[in-house]
């Protein structure tokens, strides 16, 4: 199973959320592919560089990020993001979703992942093409039992 994680899940790892960490270890043991977009990498590293202890924070962030497979935001993802953003504009919902989340949703479509795991489901449920695949970590835990 290919599972794409957004930034909110990475933040939970940094916060030592034991439930999230246990679920991720279980996924690795079951040989699932744990993926993050380079968009997520950028978001997490930006937050790390903004901290007063940035050197230490960046090292810690990279340790967490390197446990995932990084997927580049490529040409196909760019086209998918244009389609998703156009949909939001047509539906007059363009202000309801942060732009990085549009890019992550596009990456999900491009990679044909099984699930997109986030704590911010509302940011992704606006997209009809992916809403049935958007889970929080507790819902993912139920799926993998």
Image (cartoon, rainbow, N blue to C red):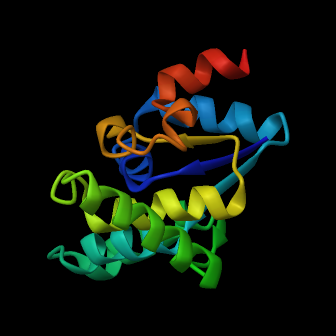
- Residue 67 seen in the current view: no
Looking at the rendering, which quadrant does residue 31 occupy? top right
The percent coordinates of residue 139 (x first, y second) are: 52, 21
The percent coordinates of residue 124 (x first, y second) are: 39, 44
Quarter that holds the C terminus: top right
Above or below, 48 against 95 in this view is below
Quarter that holds the N terminus: top right
Residue at 28% from the left image edge and 58% from the top image edge: 90
Residue 66 vs residue 114, the one in the foreground:
114
Residue at 25% from the left image edge and 62% from the top image edge: 89
Residue at 61% from the left image edge and 15% from the top image edge: 142
The percent coordinates of residue 56 (x first, y second) are: 34, 75
Residue at 36% from the left image edge and 66% from the top image edge: 86
**Relative to residue 24, is residue 2 drawn left or right?**
right
Above or below, 134 against 33 in this view is above
- Residue 34 seen in the current view: yes
């Amino acid at each position: 199973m290919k599972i794409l994680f957004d930034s909110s899940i990475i933040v939970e790892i940094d916060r030592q959320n034991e439930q999230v960490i246990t679920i991720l270890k279980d996924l690795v043991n079951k040989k699932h592919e744990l993926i993050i977009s380079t968009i997520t990498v950028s978001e997490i590293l930006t937050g790390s560089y903004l901290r007063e202890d940035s050197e230490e924070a960046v090292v810690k962030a990279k340790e967490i990020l390197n446990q995932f497979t990084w997927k580049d935001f490529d040409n196909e993802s760019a086209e998918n993001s244009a389609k998703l953003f156009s949909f939001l504009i047509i539906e007059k919902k363009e202000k309801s979703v942060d732009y990085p989340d549009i890019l992550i949703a596009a990456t999900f479509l491009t990679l044909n992942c099984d699930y997109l795991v986030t704590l911010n489901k509302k940011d992704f449920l606006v997209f009809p093409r992916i809403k049935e695949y958007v889970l929080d970590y507790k819902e993912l835990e139920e799926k993998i039992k």
